[in-house]
Amino acid sequence: MGSLAEGMHMDAAGIVGHVGRKGLRFALTDRAGEVVPGSMRLYGSEHGSSVSGTLSTFQRDSGLGRLPERSAIAVAGLARGDAISITHTPWYVSRSGLRAMLGQPPLILNDFEAEAWALSDHRHGALLPLGAAPTVALQAPGTYCVIGMTSGLGVSVLVHKPDGSVRVLATEAGHAGFAPASRAMAELVAAIFPNRYPVVAEHVISATGLVAIYNELASTQKLAKRATKPEDITRLANIDPLARQACERLCEAFWTYTSGLVLTLGAWDGVIVTGKLAMALREILALETMATAFHGTGKYMRVLATVPRAVTALDHGELNGAARALGPRFD
């Protein structure tokens, strides 16, 4: 471990992290702004509730005499204010605490903002087409919507400018209201969330939303349930009619909502879908019936039909994106 730690210490120009619902990850970056191979470490809730405390553990585990001053931390939540609490976890991020610990103000960004930064570098994710949708030319100048379907629903905007520069806009669009596009969907959502106005999009379009849809369909149709977890529902989708129906309803809701995002954000150049749940549902997301849900029947249905759509599985997207946002060290 000594030689590895010494090598990482020599290369380390920055530190990047991800504070999510399932744990904390940290890694070192080199002077070129790249994540140092072998430097990533994962920590669970047993390591305390503060990022600074877990960073001290990371420093010790990595055999470093000191941590780099430059840092970028991706968080599962709204990256505003000094003390940022991560929803449904004991963790929080303190800007002032990290500045006091490291010596420079940290860059704090939303996790899906980080994923968009990762996608700005084509090395960090192969884009897989969805059905007959046009191919996403992600390196071409344009405005792209990055939307992640996981335990939550994350949305960011990636802009490639003609001069080659990149801008990323973080949003909390997953917490906006969901508007059903059919009577059947409206009745389903109303049954799951009675007397809730508006229904938050993330509550429908997520892993927990899939379970809620599955349970409601089973109850309404008086069918026996064979699954209790979202991964079980997606696994059964090709052999169990109830699981298949639940997955299709979720995908229909996803494309209906994503269509509205394209109109709102002006992301005419492409939609890039990320997240483990999205990858598990790739076949259904690519169906022609889902393309119809995306195009809709409104004024811009023909333009929406030309919007490229793809899905990707990013390898440590939050960390690689944080590294790209932090950038190289110039000194």
Image (cartoon, rainbow, N blue to C red):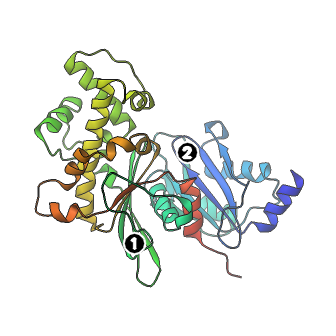
Q: Residues within 10 Å of mark 1 (few under 14, many from 20)?
A: many
Q: Please, is residue 301 above or below residue 275 in the view?
A: below
Of labels 2 and 1, the one closer to you: 1
> SS for tag 2?
loop
Front-most of residues 304 and 61:
304
Residue type at mark 1 is Val
Quadrant in which residue 5 is drawn: bottom right
The residue beneath circle 1 is: 159
Question: Residue 91's mark?
Answer: 2
Instruction: Describe residue 279's horizontal placement relative to residue 324 as left or right.
Output: left
Give the image location of residue 114, x and y in percent.
50, 60
Instruction: Describe residue 287's horizontal placement relative to residue 88 as left or right.
Output: left
Circles 2 and 1, Cβ within 8 Å, touching? The answer is no
Q: Please, is residue 120 above or below residue 149 in the view?
A: below
Residue type at mark 2 is Trp
Instruction: Tell me the residue at 53%/46% (across/down).
Output: 20
Instruction: Tell me the residue at 71%/82% (across/down).
Output: 331
How many discs appear?
2
Q: Is residue 252 visible?
A: yes
